[in-house]
Amino acid sequence: MLIAQFQNLVKTYGDTVALRGVTFDVHGSEIFGLLGPNGAGKSTVIRILMDIIRADSGEVLVFGEPRRREHLDRMGYLPEERGLYTRLTVLDVMTYFGTLKGLPRATARKKATEWLDRVELPHVAGWKVDRLSKGMSQKVQIASVLMSDPELCVLDEPTTGLDPVNVRLVQDLLLERRRQGRTTILSTHHMNQVEALCDRVALVNKGRLVVYGEVDEVRRQHSLPEVLVHAERPLPQVPGIVSVVAEGDDGWRITLADGMKPADALAALVRAGAPVVRFEPMLAPMEDIFLRVVREEAA
Amino acid sequence: MTRWHKVRTVAAFEFLTAVKRPGYLIATFGMPLFIAAYGAMVAIPAYYAQLKDQEQAIYGVVDGAGFLQLQGDIAAPEVELPAEVKNAAGALGQTEAVKSALGKSNFIFRPFEEEPKARQAMIGQAIKGYFVIAPDYIDSGRVDIYTPDEVSMSGSDSRQAFANLIRERLLSGKLDEKLRHRVITPMADSKRLSIKRTGEVIEDDQAASILRLAVPLVFIILFLMSVLMTSGYLMQGTATEKENKVVEVLLASANPDEILAGKLAGLGGAGLLQIGVWLLMALATGIGVIPMLLTSGVQIPWMAVSLAVPLFIISFLFFGSLILGTGSLGSNMREAQQLAMVWSLLAALPLMLLAVFIREPHGSAARVMTWVPFSSGSLIMLRASMDPAFLAWWEVAGALVVLAISTRLALAVGARLFRVGLLSSGARPKLREIIRQARLAN
């Protein structure tokens, strides 16, 4: 099921073109990574989705229909530039945000208390917001977004400023949402999180969609034709394998000739009598793909 | 969740946040206390001055003409109270008290044979001053008045009392008692009547006239105070939300017009509550005025009174939308206030032109301004209060419709500017960009 569809979005700010016809879909029950360098247009896409700004042209469909204001109650949003009402208590602020999302006040208050427990901050409920540390404030904001259990949630850099323990806590919350059938659009610069969490990604650069698809497929597409082979003894020479470089005691990194598929290379090695223990096509890290694509675009 | 729920949620939040502010509480409960303290500072010395005035004041008289024939100290003739004062005192059940306080003269005139003796008595503070009647008084009318070289506020009263004494003595034995009394107080029981433009004759009641002016005046002043104070809260709240970066969360949860309407309703409610507290405190301290108004037959301008609340709310929404929409374009609080100042000045326009409208409540200027949304609320109140017979029903209905439509437009324009303003950061957006963004906000 398609939860969000972005169709040919165009947006300009004065003379600056922020989006030049961006089109992609977000599926249900997935964590979708929205990637791109600073100023690429990610926040513009998100703001258009949340109806904070309007696209010059193009369309956004949400839950299978043209996006309406009523859909916002089923959506959550943690903006990149975020904040809280500093002079109010944490519980009051969370309750307000909950009621704005359609929760009855009593329910919002109860959910806020529960979610403060979940982010391991039950003791700050009565604190004024300006007493919170940066990390605490970050977790309170994430809890404020997730407490209304939105079907579609957009989180812009949710783990910035968090220590590794709290990063893991947030990641676990997102994985739990996926298990519950909820969808999350995650905008982040942390590529290790993309690999760990995201099912599919879209990479936007200079207002254009430059990479889009399942994470593994994207990594495969952008990987060099290399395979890591573990074997009990050195590999024999076979046609289609350009080079073999030793990696550790029992590993060899082989480079395939153009057009040679990893499965065909494995078959050829086995036929040649190679005692293959493990055969692992090497996938490019998302960070490398990100850097390569952005640099190629810049060039 | 429907729009009204969003509006209500924002309104409740803004209202509760506003009324819990120390500044609000100080203004709400401190302002009447401050005014009371200020009033006391003015009233207490005035009270003691009045007490002093009620003490017997002895003035000397050197009767050069010899017609007064004073044989010792003599009090001035009693003063007749004006009819309006008698009516008002009667309504309060205080006729005797007022009569005893005001009706009795406290001036005593003491004869002196010659001027130097009177002067010595004044220097010795035995008398407050003295009158010297010239020997040719009957021909010349000359009376010299000697008083200490200091500022005195009761000089005219003593002169009036002495003039009454002279009149009484000049007429003594020349007219019968009744006629003599009438000459001294020729209009002891006068009644003022007014003829309305419809031809109806009514008693011209000073209290009613004051009330007919006071009702719109209080409305205009309270409205202006409310607009100015609430707009301050509105802009401060919006500036804080921009600063705190909460705006995107709000805009991702509710429409700009829902947020705008909620803010206006919540902060407007806080403003109304503040005014309500002030009026209640004023009413509690001046509770005696109500039975006086009701029992003395004063015509209360009910039409204006009944229009006050709806006009207040619609006008408040009209100005509030424009002020908040324009103010949100400012990159800081000072810039926001500068941008919104034009609306505050327009809200104050009826007060600035009040003298013109009071002189001619149904003149051309007043009639035209009734249809202008910036002034229609105040003008309807003024005209409905001062002379309701000449305010046609279609003028009231038409002006209300114009004001309601203008308010709806102001809310729409204000909401668009509000959205553009909320999302702008740093320098103020240029007019072209504002228009472009506002159009996109459809």
Image (cartoon, rainbow, N blue to C red):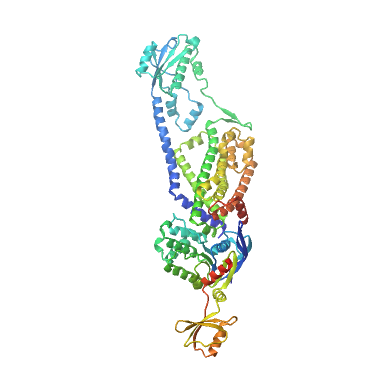
Q: Position of residue A238 (x, y in %)?
A: 55, 87
Q: Quadrant of the N terminus of chain B?
A: bottom right
Residues A293 and A79: in front is A293
Could you tell whether B64 is left or right of B438 in the image? left
Res. A63 in view: no
What residue sits 52% from the left and 90% below the top?
A273
Q: Quadrant of the C terminus of chain B?
A: bottom right
Res. A277 in view: yes
The part of the image, by quadrant, that contains residue A260 is: bottom right
Q: Position of residue A151 (x, y in %)?
A: 54, 67
Q: Position of residue A4 (x, y in %)?
A: 58, 67
What residue sits 50% from the left and 45% below the top?
B229
Residues A9 and B302: in front is A9
On screen, residue A221 above or below B272: below
Could you tell whether A36 is left or right of A87 in the image? right
On screen, residue A67 above or below B374: below
On screen, residue B42 above or below B8: above
The count of marks equals: 0
What residue sits 59% from the left and 41% below the top?
B375
Could you tell whether A54 is left or right of B274 in the image? right
Residues A164 and B391: in front is A164
Q: Position of residue B293 (x, y in %)?
A: 50, 35
Find the residue positioned furthest to the left: B124
On screen, residue A218 above or below B266: below
